[in-house]
Image (spheres, rainbow, N blue to C red):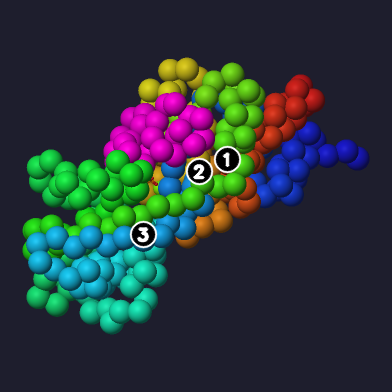
Amino acid sequence: ATMPPLLAAIAVAGRRGTLVKDATVLEALAEVDAVALDKTGTVTVGRPRVLDVRPVGGWGADEVLAMAAAAEVGSEHVLGRAVREHARHLEIPGADGTTALPGTGVRARVGRHDVAVGRPELLDGPAPAEVEDLRAEGHTAVVVVVDGALAGVLALADELRPGAGAALADLTATLGRAPELLTGDADGPARRVGAELGVDRVHAGLLPADKVEHVRRLQRYGRVLAAGDGLNDAPLLASADVGLVVGDGAGGLGVRAADGVLTRDPVASLAPLVRLARRARRISR
Ligand code: ADP
Ligand code: MG
């Protein structure tokens, strides 16, 4: 007996590291018209590093870093991991009442202080000069806010996945439409990554709900495939026609919202996956 084409394709995809939930996912993949990709942890490797700590308002660099790391204890976000990693050599004070602010950062009580770590929008008003400078350099700026006032800015950067540019060119050729990059990060770093990848459509500063909005807009062109890290991309993955979670990083929480898991080479897997799905559907008809 021969295996039905869609099942055979599920097996092939699996061998290549993409696990799809069922055959309907392959049918939907065969019809994908547009792709939305999350930046951090999806097109980038998702192992950002802290490059610089710039204290503000009289705090010491180590003090700022230690408070930030304290607030990030328990954070599953790759930026949280990067902050803890960078503070490894320091004594980290205890924190309590830690709350994750999805797509924004974390907040916790550290000793006598209320500490928030995350996107500069945590502060009211225009972004401070330190933030603007780092963004212009293409870095991700994370602010450390202590008792409501800026105490420092952390500069972080992540590397692109090797071969991501070529993989996205392949995807553009396969779909006849260039993928779009969606990110909660700021314009500067988002555009730097877009330029390195050859992607012009870059949408920055998005909250998880804005990413959903964006998928809805893209759905005017047809079916949308979205890939994200699942940490705060669960709504994005759920709203797309096909949502694939990157399963090689810290993620995993978004898996239930996803139609499949990209366990290896998440970006390079996409175009071959669409072609595989198209072939399987052709044969099965
Ligand atoms: P992306 O869309 O690129 O995956 P996220 O939506 O995960 O980015 O996060 C958007 C922004 O929120 C980050 O660029 C960062 O400024 C901030 N952020 C989110 N979580 C954290 C955290 N745990 N620590 C510091 N900053 C965070
Ligand atoms: Mg993300």
Which numbered disc, 3 or 1, marks the residue closer to the eye? 3
Ligand 1 within 8 Å, label 1 CB: no
Q: Is residue 151 visible?
A: yes
Q: Which residue is mark 3?
A: 51
In the image shown, does 105 or 243 lie closer to the viewer?
Answer: 105
Q: How many marks?
A: 3
Q: Which residue is mark 2?
A: 43
Q: Which residue is mark 1?
A: 164
Residue type pointed to by label 1: Ala
Q: CA distance from mark 3 to mark 2?
A: 20 Å
Sequence-wise, the earlier of marks 1 and 2 is 2
Percent position (x, y) of residue 202?
40, 31
Disc 1 to disc 2: CB gap under 8 Å: yes
Ligand 1 within 8 Å, label 2 CB: no
Give the magenta-colored segment's residue range: 187-214
Which numbered disc, 3 or 2, marks the residue closer to the eye? 3
Q: Residue at x 38, y 23 (%)?
A: 217
Helix, strand, or loop for circle 3? strand
Disc 3 to disc 1: CB gap under 8 Å: no
Q: Residue at x 9, y 42 (%)?
A: 125
In the image shown, does 185 or 252 lie closer to the viewer?
Answer: 185
